[in-house]
Image: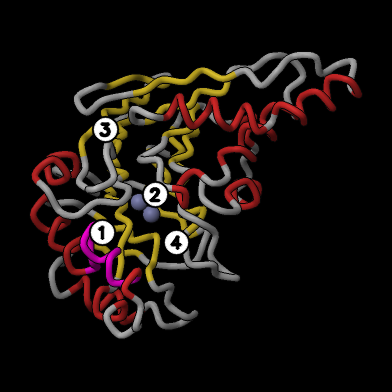
Amino acid sequence: MSIEITLLGTGSPLPSADRAGPSTLVRTGDATVLVDCGRGVVMRLAAAGVLPIGLSAVLLTHLHSDHITDLNDVITTQWVMSTEPTPLRIIGPRGTAQVVDAVLSMLERDMGYRHAHHADLQHPPTLSVTEVDPGNSFALGSTTISVHRTDHRPVEPTVGYRVEHDGAVAALAGDSVPCPELDAMCAGVDIYVQTVIRDDLAALVPSERLHDICDYHSTVEQAAQTAARAGVGTLVMTHYVPAPAPGAEDEWLTLAAAHFDGDIVIGPDLTKVTTG
Ligand SMILES: [Zn+2]
Ligand SMILES: [Zn+2]
C-alpha cells in the first residue's frame, strides 16, 4: 500500500442522516493521518478500523466549524483511552492553538471529574500543537507532507496538504476556489481530494445564505477543471452541497467528466481510494 484515502464524512454543515461532517483519513505505510474533524468523525474512524489513539497526526485545513466541530471528541477519546501520557499531534493554520486552548477550557470540568474518579488517569490530554504556514513541510515517519495556500476568502488562513509516500502522492485541498497555489499543490498527484458544491442546485433554493457559499467553494466543474490543469490521476469529490440522494451521484460524475477525463470518485461515507 502506498497511500489509501477514506472519505470518513462527505457531508457539510447541512445536517444529513447519512453523511458525517467533512473529514478524510489518509493512510500510508507508516502514518495514519486525519484531515479535519467534522460531525461524527470518531464514529466513522471506528468504522474505518482506526481509534484516535492510533492517529499519527490530525491536520486541519481551516477553522470553519464544520471542519473542527468534533475535534473535541478526537482529543477526549484519545485522552481517555491512553494508559499513559501520549501526545496527540495537531497541525493546522494560524489560529489552531487558540481553538485547541478553547477546547481544553471547555473540557476543564470533565478533566476534573475523571482525575477524581480514575486513579490511573491523572494526566491531562497531552497535545502537541503546531501552526503551519504555506511553504512549510514536515515528516511523519517516511511520509512527507507539505503545506500550501488555498483560497477560501474571507476565511483566512486556509491551507491544503500534499502527502507523499513511497512514490505516491495525494493532495487534500479542503475548501477552496481554484487558484494557482491549488494547481501547484495538485500538480501530477495520484489522488486529488476536493470539497465541492453544486452552484446550479444551490441557486434553486431561495436562501441568500446558501447562495453566499457558492463564491468560496469549488463547484464540481471547477474541481474537474483543476484536476485537468494539474494532470491528476483521480479526482475524489467530498463535502457535497447539497448532498445527493442515494443513487443520484451519477449526475455529479457526468458534470465532472465533461471537464476531466481521468478517474472520478464520488460516493457515500467510507468510500476508499488507493493509489497504484
Ligand atoms: Zn470552509
Ligand atoms: Zn466546509
Q: Going by the picture, which residue comes out furthest to the front? A: 208
Mark 1 or mark 3: which is in front? 1
Amino acid under disc 1: His
Mark 4, Cα crowd under 10 Å, few <14 / some 14-19 / many 20+, is many
Q: What residue is drawn where x is 22% and y is 77%? A: 255
Q: Which residue is mark 1?
A: 217
Under circle 3, the secondary element is: loop
Horizontal placement of 204 versus 3: left or right? left
Q: What residue is drawn where x is 81% and y is 18%? A: 121
Tell me the quadrant of the picture where the N terminus can be found.
top left
Cα gap from disc 1 to disc 4, whole angstroms: 12 Å
Q: Which residue is mark 3?
A: 167
Residue 168 at least partly seen: no
Residue 34 at least partly seen: yes
As drawn, 59 above or below 220: above
Q: Which residue is mark 2?
A: 274
Mark 1, Cα crowd under 10 Å, few <14 / some 14-19 / many 20+, is many
Q: Earlier in the sequence, mark 1 or mark 2?
A: 1
Range of magenta residues: 210-220
Amino acid under disc 4: Ser
Q: What residue is drawn where x is 31% and y is 34%? A: 163
Q: Earlier in the sequence, mark 4 or mark 2?
A: 4
| Coordinates of residue 117 in the picture (x, y in percent) | 91, 24
Under circle 4, the secondary element is: loop
Q: Which mark is residue 259?
A: none
